[in-house]
Image (spheres, grey):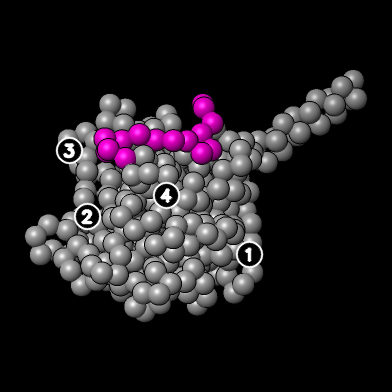
């Protein structure tokens, strides 16, 4: 298995594409209407306690989502090939860490969107001891997403992450932090498929304040966002039936030049609906804890020693 802590991906676009772990939830224009800032995007009310940060033994940084007390969803390129994964969840200003060596990727070989190998950039991390009870968990969204066609505004997705931040007209200017969770939203513009049978990735453009209220335009200077470093693996949430559900895993940002995460750039992710069977089947299997296997080995050594001593 190859290590891809910060890979560079290519997809069929006339632009430079990089994983969102290299960029974070951005704010609108500082002088827009209303004025915005990275500080305004921080989830100080703990609305999204089930979204955590990720750090790996391979120096990867990203975000994640708790699907249950034992399972965390993230992007494969954040964890692929590393020895251990540590996730951090912040509630009430207190950050708690959980480290695991048990994670699973779905047909991942280091590419984000690969039609021939169905190379989906998603991963699950198993937390053997379980997460604290004050950490929210999210279910998967089973419905379909809509796009900005005609007068349709497309599905609104809430993006949550622990990455860098900044302003839409300036770009990244604020460092990532494993205990600072930011929130924004965007609208699905395009859905794409890899194998011709299902939609597996979504695309969202970062609109400026001038397009507010237009079909497919900005959600407002204080709401519209894109991904930036540390947001890979974070959720794209959709609000239905009175709750937030996970509609996608954020993975990628594309831009025309070297200025990342500005107005006009695009964010991408993998829909959870396209991998829901794999997610559910993986979560239905409880891995054998490494400590349990070690304990069995020690018991065997003790028994052998006792038998030899009795002789």
Q: Foreground mark, 4 or 1?
A: 4
In the picture, measured across the screen, residue 153 lies left or right of residue 248, that is left
> Tags 3 and 4 in contact by the CB under 8 Å rule?
no
Residue occupied by mark 4: 259
Q: Foreground mark, 3 or 2?
A: 2
Give the quadrant of residue 285: top left
**Residue at image x 76%, y 33%?**
298
Judge whether residue 212 is colored magenta: no
Residue 49 visible in the picture: yes
> Tags 1 and 3 in contact by the CB under 8 Å rule?
no
Front position in the image: 266 or 63: 266
**What is the spatial separation of the Cα atoms under label 3 and label 2, in whole angstroms?**
19 Å
**What is the spatial separation of the Cα atoms under label 1 and label 3, in whole angstroms?**
41 Å
Image location (x, y in percent) of residue 227: 41, 55
Q: Foreground mark, 2 or 1?
A: 2
Quadrant into which the C terminus falls: top right
Task: Give the number of the disc on residue 189.
Answer: 2
Magenta stretch, residue numbers:
1-15
Front position in the image: 129 or 269: 269
Q: Residues within 10 Å of mark 4 (few under 14, many from 20)?
A: few
Numbered disc 3: secondary structure: loop
Marker count (numbered): 4
Residue 238 visible in the picture: no
Q: Earlier in the sequence, mark 4 or mark 2?
A: 2
Image location (x, y in percent) of residue 236: 36, 58
> Tags 4 and 1 in contact by the CB under 8 Å rule?
no
Residue occupied by mark 3: 197
Front position in the image: 92 or 20: 20
Numbered disc 1: secondary structure: strand
């Amino acid at each position: 298995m190859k290590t891809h802590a910060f890979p560079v991906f290519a997809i069929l676009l006339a632009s430079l594409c990089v994983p969102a772990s290299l960029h974070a939830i951005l704010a609108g224009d500082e002088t827009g209407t209303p004025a915005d800032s990275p500080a305004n995007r921080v989830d100080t009310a703990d609305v999204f306690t089930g979204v955590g940060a990720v750090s790996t033994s391979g120096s990867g940084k990203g975000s994640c989502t708790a699907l249950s007390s034992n399972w965390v969803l993230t992007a494969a390129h954040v964890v692929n090939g590393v020895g251990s994964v540590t996730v951090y969840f912040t509630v009430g200003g207190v950050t708690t860490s959980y480290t695991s060596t048990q994670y699973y990727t779905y047909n991942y070989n280091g590419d984000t969107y690969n039609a021939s190998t169905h190379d989906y950039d998603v991963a699950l991390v198993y937390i053997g001891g379980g997460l604290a009870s004050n950490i929210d968990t999210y279910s998967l969204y089973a419905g379909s997403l809509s796009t900005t066609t005609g007068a349709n505004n497309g599905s609104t997705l809430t993006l949550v992450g622990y990455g860098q931040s900044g302003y839409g007209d300036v770009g990244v200017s604020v460092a990532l932090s494993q205990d600072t969770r930011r929130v924004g939203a965007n609208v699905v513009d395009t859905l794409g498929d890899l194998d011709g049978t299902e939609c597996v990735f979504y695309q969202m453009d970062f609109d400026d304040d001038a397009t507010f209220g237009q079909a497919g335009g900005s959600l407002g200077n204080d709401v519209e966002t894109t991904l930036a470093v540390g947001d890979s693996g974070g959720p794209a949430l959709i609000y239905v039936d009175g709750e937030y559900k996970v509609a996608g895993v954020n993975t990628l940002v594309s831009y025309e030049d070297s200025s990342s995460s500005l107005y006009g750039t695009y964010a991408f992710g993998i829909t959870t609906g396209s991998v829901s069977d794999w997610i559910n089947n993986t979560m239905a299997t409880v891995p054998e804890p490494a400590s349990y296997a070690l304990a069995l080995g020690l018991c065997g050594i003790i028994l052998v020693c006792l038998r030899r001593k009795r002789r």
